[in-house]
Image (cartoon, grey):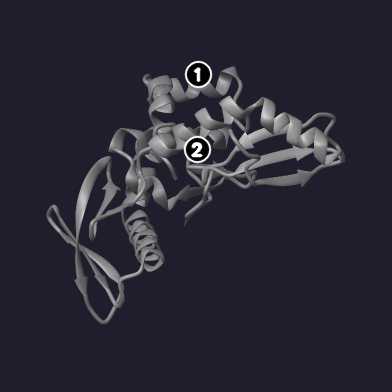
Amino acid sequence: MDFLPTYKHIVNTKLKNIYLSVNADGEIVVRSPRVSLESIERLIVSKSNWINKAKEKIILKKGKAEFSNGNLTIFYLGKKVDIVLQEARKNKIDFVEDEFTLFFTRRCADMFHKTIDKFYLERAKLTLPIIVEKWSNVMELKPTRLKFRKTKTQWGSCNSKNEIQLNSSLMKLPPHLIDYVIIHELCHIKHKHHQKGFWEAVEVYCPEHKRCRKQLKEFTT
């Protein structure tokens, strides 16, 4: 690391130490009590090798839309698919069998990303409730509400009211990982923690949950 990289500093007076992380966008995040700028910079320099490795892992993660030489590829249900680009009056993605077409009003990477995110959200609302209902019936655990939105860090969550929120980016994942995330969140209806009882419940319906958790880390939200 030849120079000090940019970073985001979050001050939390309840903390006793300085904590360093790299978020899903590859941004360095420093959380600390009120400390000197020199203390933060010394930590970043001392952890330069770790930072570089963390950023490399993020770059290698699957699930990102890729633009190259005018071509576009995305992940859908665990498979990398090519997108046909076609100019039109409305931004949207259609697919017939295995052929995906992105219709666009203007060629713009930011617009492409927004259109892709909208596509994932639409597909999530159509596809995921059916899978949730299937596992709810099997597990006899029913959420009070099911919500969908794109988030940067969580594939899913279950709150104290037993409302489950699922990340629309789940549509990037292969079916067995979608099942795992849904089973995981349904188990939180009964177990509001990640202690032994929770993981024993998950294992009943997903014996390969340890392998699934590892595979899940290979994908970006």
Residue 12 versus residue 180 in the image, above or below: below
The C terminus sits in image quarter: top left
Image position of 208 (left or right of 142):
left
Q: At which x and y percent is residue 11? A: 80, 44
Q: At which x and y percent is residue 127? A: 31, 52
Q: Residue 42 versus residue 142: which sits nearer the camera?
A: 42
Mark 1 closeness class: few <14, some 14–19, many ≥20 residues within 10 Å: some
Residue at far bottom of view: 89
Image position of 178 (left or right of 161):
left
Mark 2 closeness class: few <14, some 14–19, many ≥20 residues within 10 Å: many
The quarter of the picture where residue 89 lies is: bottom left
Image mark count: 2
Q: Which residue is mark 2?
A: 185
Q: Which residue is mark 1?
A: 200
Helix, strand or loop at disc 2? helix
Q: At which x and y percent is residue 10? A: 75, 45
Residue drawn at x 21%, y 49% is: 81
Q: CA distance from mark 2 to mark 1?
A: 14 Å
Q: Amino acid at mark 2?
A: Glu
Q: Residue 118 versus residue 33: which sits nearer the camera?
A: 33
Residue 3 versus residue 106 in the image, above or below: above
Residue drawn at x 38%, y 21% is: 211
Task: Say whether disc 2 or disc 1 marks the residue closer to the N-terminus.
Answer: 2
